[in-house]
Amino acid sequence: MASSSSNDHDLIPADADNTGQTKVTNRRTFLAGVVAVGASSLTGLKAHAQLVTATTAGTVSFSPTVSLPTVAQGIGPVTLAAPGTAVTLLDAAAHPKFRETLPNPLSAINRFAPSAGLASYSLQIKEFNSNIGLVDGRNKPLTTVLWGYGTASQAPTSPARTFAVRSGSSIQVSYVNLLLNGSGAPLAHRLPIDTTLMWANPGNLGGQAPVPLVAHRHGGGSADTAADGLPDGWSTPDANRDGTPDFRGRLYSTPYLFNNTQEAGHLWFHDHALGVTRLNVSMGLAGNYLIRDANEDYLIERGMLPSQAYELPLLIQDRMFDASGKVHYPSSDLAMYPNAPAITHLPEFFGDFVLVNGVPWPKCEVEPRPYRLRLLNGSDSRFYDLKFERANGNALGFHQVGTELGLMDAPVALNHLVLAPGERADLVIDFAGLANQTLTVGNCANSPFPNGDPVDPLTAGKIMAFKVSLPLNRDVRPSVLPVYLRPIHGLLPALRTAGVAKRKLMLFEGTDPLGRLQTMLGTVNPAAGNPANPAFGTFFYADPVTETMAAGSTEIWELHNATVDAHPIHLHLVDFRILSRQPFTGTVVDKPMGPGGSYGGGYLTKIAMSGAARPAEPNEAGRKDTVISYPGEVTRILVNFARPGEYVWHCHILSHEDHEMMRRFIVT
């Protein structure tokens, strides 16, 4: 496609495979041809980063005997390596694997107990030391400092204990930030904060302390939209002991009311504080939230779904650790960003340790029968392409029965599963006939996905192991999957698109004033040729809202991915259905943004479809809240906006959402 000027750049997918997904082998070279690098201006960067720092207070205030990683000993002092100091990392390739036992988040010891009455929970966020299964080169156990959710009677854990609630039964949850030292002073962040980003910045102090936190329940619909846990709903500890947090975001609210008026599904909760989500989650702030209902009961009672000891939530996260066992989060790359500050944001994070339910590369002993696995990708940037591999290298097939927000109409047979950050998958796998065998869960996803570097088979290429070593309990009949999964609810609604309004949106990779990669969201001009116009193109998080819709309305969102990577796009407090994906071409036009035009944004123009649309994958047929948008494709989703309020939509690669790949939307 010809360019109309020196500031236009053709977006032409290279080496497209038979799925229409773009294959680009050199990310930096491609980006250099797509968007102009903005002039370096640290002053301009800081000016933009301070646009949203409100501190307005809200008026309304989440093996049966194996526990999740919890308190091991007292807390030590907070220490950060000086910027530029070399850090010795724990050797992931040499670390023992499949030695530690997998905790079951559904066992009684790993569930939250109500704090008051039957439906009220008061969660305390604290720092603690834990032995999660890390050892040094001499096999000596290492202690890891973590943050976790606990209660007055239950010690904090990481990941958090599980909420298991009934559909239609409301609960009230309050979260209290207790990141304080022994003297009652606010703790400093254990990980380095890039203060040049748009971030919560409590009190405009611009430092490591106090730490802002806000818990977001991911995937839940609630009548109380203030309970969403938005990035601007953060708070710090109440160090001055006046009964309220010392600093609060403009959307701070407590307690949260969750009415759980939705089908059985796999929700989760994690920290979402503006600009530091990736750091707070890396410190341990995430957990499962499962809703049960009559339809699921029907299937379980009739032996159609595994349950109790045969149901296992699996929260998969990648991490790095230093040689002492501390969580490590990279904050410099002189080869990539020689002019960046000593502590800088990096485009993605790919850890070399894989934790499942907080334990590195665990093992799980199982019976030769079907199990229900509730998978959740809680990683920062890493996609997983998972297989259950036998010793001979052959993959064991399995069925997916549900997506994030409920059961599908029928099971879908699979031999591998792609799972993006933020996505969940409800699986049933049958270990019958495999007594005394070991199956390894392997991962072959490139990073960044799908066209980045191959995964290291010695580290993140391994997830966990299932050892079929337990005798079959003949008192419990093995489950048999039904043909139909929704006997009470009935079939999912037909996808009706006639007359539905369409909204054209874009995913973009630009630059900030320091020349750093900056992923962004924006809008596409729907006029013929999609001409550049200041009312469209990329926008900052703090820019005026461009997505406003009426409560009860339905729209088709067309997500045009003009980047070289796949992005998991998440919409808060809505559910949607995936319609199709289709390859496209277009021309990117530069859009200078921010103070002095120092940010390199863009417009997406001259869009043309370059291949046939393909429907959602069979295992994406259910209700979703997160969708993979592949490079060089438009992904279409059918979205129902059921309740009024302010929300956000963003990429669920945490490093991306922390650096402007997030926008607000308003439902009136």
Image: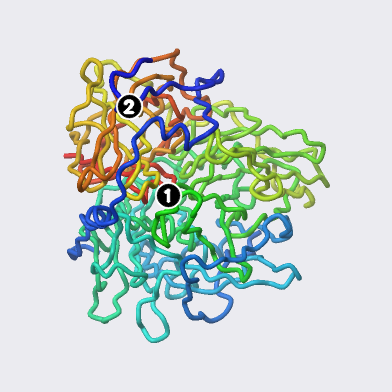
Image position, residue 317 (x, y; %) = 55, 52
As displayed, is residue 474 above or below residue 561? below
Residue bearing mark 1: 654
Q: Nearer the viewer, mark 1 or mark 2?
A: 2
Q: Nearer the viewer, residue 291 or 444?
A: 444
Pick the quarter of the image with the N terminus: top left
Pick the quarter of the image with the C terminus: top left
Mark 2, Cα crowd under 10 Å, few <14 / some 14-19 / many 20+, is many
Q: Is residue 302 visible to us here?
A: no
Q: Which residue occupies the extreme bottom position in the image? A: 183
Image position, residue 60 (x, y; %) = 21, 62
The numbered dot on residue 131 is none
Q: Is residue 657 visible to us here?
A: yes
The local secondary structure at tag 1 comes to helix
Q: Residue at x 42, y 44 (%)?
A: 652
The numbered dot on residue 588 is 2
As displayed, is residue 572 above or below residue 506? below
Image position, residue 478 (x, y; %) = 69, 41
- The amino acid sitting under disc 2 is Val
Mark 1, Cα crowd under 10 Å, few <14 / some 14-19 / many 20+, is many
Q: Residue at x 36, y 36 (%)?
A: 575
In the image, 655: left or right of 60?
right
For marks 1 and 2, the one nearer the N-term is 2
- The amino acid sitting under disc 1 is Leu
